[in-house]
Image (cartoon, rainbow, N blue to C red):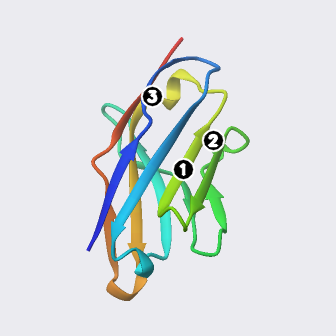
Amino acid sequence: QVQLVESGGGLVQAGGSLRLSCAASGSIFEINTMGWYRQAPGKQRELVATVTSFGETNYVDSVKGRFTISRDNAKNTMYLQMNSLKPEDTAVYYCNAYIRSRRSFYWGQGTQVTVSS
């Protein structure tokens, strides 16, 4: 099992920045890919960014150049640095971990990010 706890959400004005953190515990050595997803009211959950255990990253087009995902394996923590925030970035952001050997996904409880115009 893997437990994920997000933090760092909040209210920010458009153009501002926030850094989300996701602390992992449990079977962390089995984690392959980690990622951030978000879900806005009335919309489906969407992938924002992923990072593999080798540090390879991938981003949805709408956040490229503004968001940076990173992973500190020594601290068992993943981050999402969000710059130049826009009102359309408003959503609940979820941390995700994938263990390939178990074919299992694990989710955090989510953290609210609200960007005011």
Q: Distance of mark 3 from mark 2, alpha carbons?
A: 12 Å
**Quadrant, the C terminus:** top right
Q: Distance of mark 3 from mark 1, alpha carbons?
A: 17 Å
Q: Nearer the viewer, mark 2 or mark 1?
A: 1
Report which quarter residue 23 is drawn in: bottom left
- Mark 2 or mark 3, which is nearer the start of the sequence? 2
- Mark 1 or mark 2, which is nearer the start of the sequence? 2
Q: Which residue is mark 3?
A: 90
For image coordinates 51% across by 27% down, the residue present is: 88
Number of the label disc, if any, that sits on residue 79:
1
Q: Residues within 10 Å of mark 1 (few under 14, many from 20)?
A: many
Q: Amino acid at mark 1?
A: Tyr
Q: Of all residues shown, which one is farthest toward the right?
A: 65
For image coordinates 52% across by 21% down, the residue present is: 87
Q: Distance of mark 2 from mark 1, alpha carbons?
A: 15 Å
Q: Residues within 10 Å of mark 2 (few under 14, many from 20)?
A: some
Secondary-structure class at tag 2: helix
- Mark 1 or mark 3, which is nearer the start of the sequence? 1
- Front one among 50 and 79: 79
Above or below 22: residue 2: below
The percent position of residue 95, horizontal first and vertical second, equals 40, 53
For image coordinates 63% across by 60% down, the residue present is: 58
Q: Which residue is mark 2?
A: 63
Above or below 93: residue 57: below
Report which quarter residue 106 is drawn in: bottom left
Left/right placement of residue 60 relative to residue 89 reads right
